Image (cartoon, grey):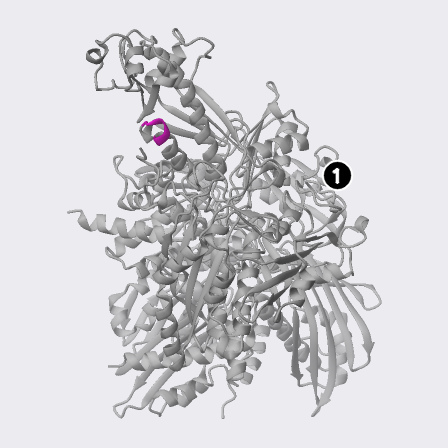
Amino acid sequence: MIPAQFDYAAPATLDEALSLLAERPDDAKILAGGHSLIPAMKLRLAQPALLIDIGRVKDLSYIREEGGQIRIGAMTTHYQLESSERLREICPLLPECAASIGDVQVRNKGTIGGSLAHADPAADWPAAIISLRAELVAVSSRGERVIAADDFFVDMLTTALRPDEVLREIRINAPGGRTGQAYMKVHHPASGFAVVGVAVSLTLGADGKCSAAGVGITGVATKAYRAAQVEGALVGSTPDEQTTASAASHAADGVDANGDIYASADYRRHLAVVYARRAIAEAVAKIK
Amino acid sequence: MKIEGTHELRAPRERVWQALVDPSVLQRCIPGCERLERTGEDSYAATLRTGVGAIKGVFQGSVRLEDMSVPTHYRIVVDGKGQPGFLKGAGDLDLEERDGGTVVRYAGDVQVGGTLASVGQRMIQGAAKMMAAQFFTALEAEAQVEQGDPPPRHGFFRTALRAISGLLRQIFKRH
Amino acid sequence: MARYVGQRVKRTEDPRLIKGLAHYVDDIRLPDTLHVAFVRSIYAHARINGVDAGEALKAPGVVAIFTGKDVSEKIGPVPCASALPELKVPDHRVLATDKVYFVGHPIAAVVAADAYAARDAAELLMIDYEELPAVVNAEEAAQGGAVIHEQFGSNVAYKLTAGEGDIVAALASADRRIKQRIINQRLAPVAMEPRGVLARYLPGEQELTVWSSTQIPHLLRTQLALMIGIPENKLRVITPEVGGGFGSKLNVYAEEALLGWISMQLGRPAKWIETRRENMQATIHGRGQVGEIEIGCKADGTVTGLRYNVVADLGAYHQLLTPAIPTLTGLMLSGAYKIPAIQINVTGVFTNKMATDAYRGAGRPEATYVVERAIDLVAAELGLDPVAVRRRNFPAPEEFPFKTATGLFYDSGNYEGALAKALENAGYERLREEQRAAREQGRIVGIGVSTYVEICALGPSQAMPAGGWESATVRIEPTGTVTVLTGASPHGQGQETSFAQLAADELGVDMGDVTVVHGDTAIVQYGIGTFGSRATAVGGTAVFVAIEKLKEKASKIAAHMLGTDAVNVVFAEGVFSIKETKKAAAAAGDGKAADADSDEVPEPVVPVGEGPAGALPEPETEGRKKVSIQEVALAAHLARELPPDTEPGLSATYFFEPKNFTFPFGTHIAVVEIDRETGEVKFQRYVAVDDCGRVINPMLVDGQVQGGIVQSIGQALYEEVVYDEQGQLITGTLMDYAVPRAKMIPWFELDRTETPTDVNPLGVKGVGEAGTIGATPAIVNAVVDALSPFGVRHIDMPIRPEAVWRIINSSDE
Amino acid sequence: MKKAVQINVNGTTRETEVEPRLLLVHYLRDVLGLTGTHVGCETSLCGACTVTVDGQAVKSCTMFAVQADGSNITTIEGLAHDGELHPVQEGFWERHGLQCGYCTPGMIMAAAQLLERNHAPTREEIRHGLEGNLCRCTGYQHIVEAVEYASKAVNREP
């Protein structure tokens, strides 16, 4: 319940934060909403020597549209995303995914950037971010780079962020045309984390055939992944009941699934298939 | 908790074996191993500074190699205690030659205690697999180095990335 | 005359709680308080070769560190109050000495200036463990292998056989015999407020005060006095607000004694507040029974006999009631049925885990689960409706008091009445039709019924380890307010309200004038505590009888004030008046009395701010026919004119000893639908009819039932304390131990029947555990019913979706 | 290395020096003596410690006091105004939404936030809105009724 001691800095600018981080990349941690890091610190499983609180850095919390992209500041809270009317119109997957995270209090404080950078294998955002083929903007005192969602999640609790980098922004190409989206999840009864979570963003062409599909799955393996075979089976086909089921059946192909006392690896794979089908059907149903 | 897996290393079995029994190589391959001092035949005292992501701990303990059968089999026993609890692992490694490379099969038992056990059950299996992958990826690199050449460096990130790219290849075999 | 009793009266304790102004242990602040952090074993079983406190002692703020060696000679063992024949009782020291026996076993207490410093220093303590093989599986523990307490030679703590009737013959005479392995998994009580202790020793006065989050302040005082070696009359236990107990605080814990002792050693207040992880590791668990039932029945569903062979997973040590819990299971194995022969064979075994003990229901939910599952197994075996099998085996209302083959006398009951009402409320026949239709559509729907009986109002003292009575003192203060002191210290049940309702009605005063005091051994006479659904039936009765005694005395004083004999005085609505008989009228004096008397009873005399400072006005009674009880109280305290041989003051104390338990009952019906693809169980309906005898506050009764059902839902579907093969507790936080949340819970359709009991004059039976006892089997029966087309007769709890999916999946293949 | 923080709690601004690691809940309880905010778990799951920070309900066990520097905080002690109970407090009292009372302050704070965002929640929405708060006593039904009561009371107000 009581964290170990640490030094604390609350820089007013990102540059300041980055230079602090550059000085101590090994033992400093960035504090965003704190909803992944502080619990670990209270259990003393994480004992950073320096906490760099970016909560006071201006302009890290926003939802903007720029150049056909949705740009989300890393410090945007889950609740801000959940309650964004604009996102509900142009990318409803984001508010839907946000609403499924934790609980009201967690969503009020936890941030999308913090969650992504922590890369919990059962976190919700990675599935959505992968399905939307988002780009993640990492900055360090050396400069800025853009990481594709597929490359961002490296392993359990491990991202492509370098020790001196901070996740600054998430960029998503606003889905156009006849797009339907859904996030469906099996909540762990105790933690609320995703036992399995499937995010789907699916676009239909004028011919009624699927022209683009994104399917991201979390909770099953040590990290969220893109269900490429499901996407492959969807694109070019008419997503009727049969096609959807057959595409979804590949949701866990080749995945080295994790098991725990609540759900075995086999069951997680099975749930991935069921929830992929349901999420695809839901996404299709939402297309008007 | 049982873990098992198979890693294909692109290095000849003899080299892999040599790497597996060389304490300096082991030190570089065991994730987070800061110190590995010989305390007896095939026994070593170890300091592991290891973890996944933000979750880190320092463990003091021992590494022991048993049931050696050159160059096909041994058993590695790791034991560490630290602030977050303790971890123990014992695994049998079997080396098989295949197409000039080596297939290493491992089957073992991982046990954690203390805080790690009481709060980490959902992640332990994944973490164990991840560490095994890191170990073998590093080992492959070691075994590929000609004797006499300087050893490779296994940055945590680089190791992990390599491990995962292998995994990714496995998962998303394109048709 | 019941102005309050039977009404949905709002609770008097609530204003302080909803404003955040109530005081739980951690909210009590004393200057100069030291804080204690415990270092606990991370191994299930290990030898301790050494504890190095060197670094920790140097840490900032550290005042002292105590290990097992420092205290084991000074503090007596943690007590076990249950006495069974040939029970093995390990020496349970407050801190581990040479060995640790479970994860969470306390090894050292670090005392520091504040909680942060104590935690920091605790991290620095070095413990040299030598790991020993852990005994985790209870059934294996009974078989041999590693032995936990070497002095006993085996892990069997006791064996017990109980029951009446010739079980062998009964089973032999059956047309069918059904065996089923049944598990009541380990559960964690998870009171929202973890345990906590604050102790303050005053060296001058040589008095120790211990504030503890406990259900049993007086029993704790006695035990702590023995453990610490302080005279009991120099020890004061206070239970401030207690944030839930569910049995987990019906105990005496090592930490309570240690904190008291530490405060005495250091001469400063010392506080320890349990963390949730400590709570999961080192506060008692419940259930933990692995058994096999065998039930015999005739072709028409009549049960001939029931045998239950059970291994009880006791954990490493006995806490207060650990070995006794399975004996309660044995007592309740007859359920709501006439079963001529019953036998229980208990093997209590030590394992390297925390002790099991009383968790809401304490042995009775286990029994009810076993019996109610067994009845459904009979129905399935014979192809009968489970309701019909229940009805066939009910005792009729006229058969009460009904003697069971477990040796109990059920006080009163109308099982058919509650069942019929529940079936009607649920629309049982229609539900079955809907189920048939749903099955035709490929849906998986199940209806589960449970007709439970529970044992409440614990209980007669000869059946209890430490007294089964309860105490009350009722006094009317000089200014007319009423103080009720109850020994049944509550922790959420609302006795401050229900006892005030009772007292206000019995005394004819406003509820606002009644204060119920509890939980302070320096103020309240010795009492037993709140557990076993006893507070109202036993504690409430004590209040009731104390009031009767008080009124008897008041009546004498009133008669004296009215110039008549007590036999001529009647009491109603707070007023003593002279009976309207000729004799009374004559005794009241001359014929003018009627004129002198006013119909209006004067307002209670409130001296504050009136008359000369401090002077109490004397009630004017001259020539009156009525006096209020407040006036009597004032007269009793002024004592200027009391009847001869009457003590001054107006107060009465009563210790109520019940002659029997009470046996509430009811019917719970759960309707569930299962997701064919995922195995997830969803509630469609939940209907319950409970009969807890007379009801004092229906709102509080509903609350008890609802809360109990949710804990049942927890056991049926979500909760399980899991230790891995090495004895590591892997459900160590609420991340993994699933306490039900609001969104997992259906709407409960509750109703009642009311069959009074003659065990106590209130006719109250008790309701604290009904939900936890009745609901679990209803839910499991519903799931099994849903899965019956797949050939399923039983499924173990908690019913995780994966297990259900595997059943459906393997059958579909 | 202590940090100075200036935090307005229930309308009063206080300046204090705190260790960076001091959790907000401990700041409220131990520094300010506002013990109505409780601690029921260590893993941000029980909600007993819920307070509002700048109008947002948060778990004060999952926040450092230093993060709240410059914020306005309302705790359960500050919810009633001029001696008048907040409608949610009323509802909990009227509908027996509490037993042991330990989860109650957090539950009330979360329910107040729920009603702020949704004036007329359905029962399902209430249950969903309280998913961050555990109660072991009531079985939640009376809590749902308490929030319904409060919702009606709020809507009655001009």
Q: Position of residue A85 (x, y in %)?
A: 24, 66
Q: Position of residue B130 (x, y in %)?
A: 60, 72
Q: Residue at x 58, y 60 (%)?
A: C184
Q: Position of residue D122 (x, y in %)?
A: 28, 59
Q: Is residue A253 visible to the viewer in this orientation of the structure? A: yes
* Residue C507 on the magenta span: yes
- Give the left or right position of residue C619, taking residue C357 as reference: left
Q: Is residue A33 visible to the viewer in this orientation of the structure? A: no
Residue C8, quarter of picture = top left
* Residue C104 on the magenta span: no
Segment colored magenta: C505-509
- Give the left or right position of residue C589, taking residue D131 as reference: left
Q: Which element carries disc 1, helix, strand or loop? A: helix
Extreme residue toward the right, this view? B41
The rendered magenta stretch, by its main secondary structure, is classed as: helix
Residue hosting label 1: C69
- Give the left or right position of residue C759, taking residue C421 as reference: right
Q: Position of residue A155 (x, y in %)?
A: 53, 72
Which quadrant, please, contains the N terminus of chain C? top left
**What is the crowding at mark 1: few (fewer than 14 residues within 10 Å), some, or many (at least 20)?**
some
Q: Residue at x 26, y 9 (%)?
A: C623
Instruction: Indicate whether C296 appears above or below D67.
Output: below
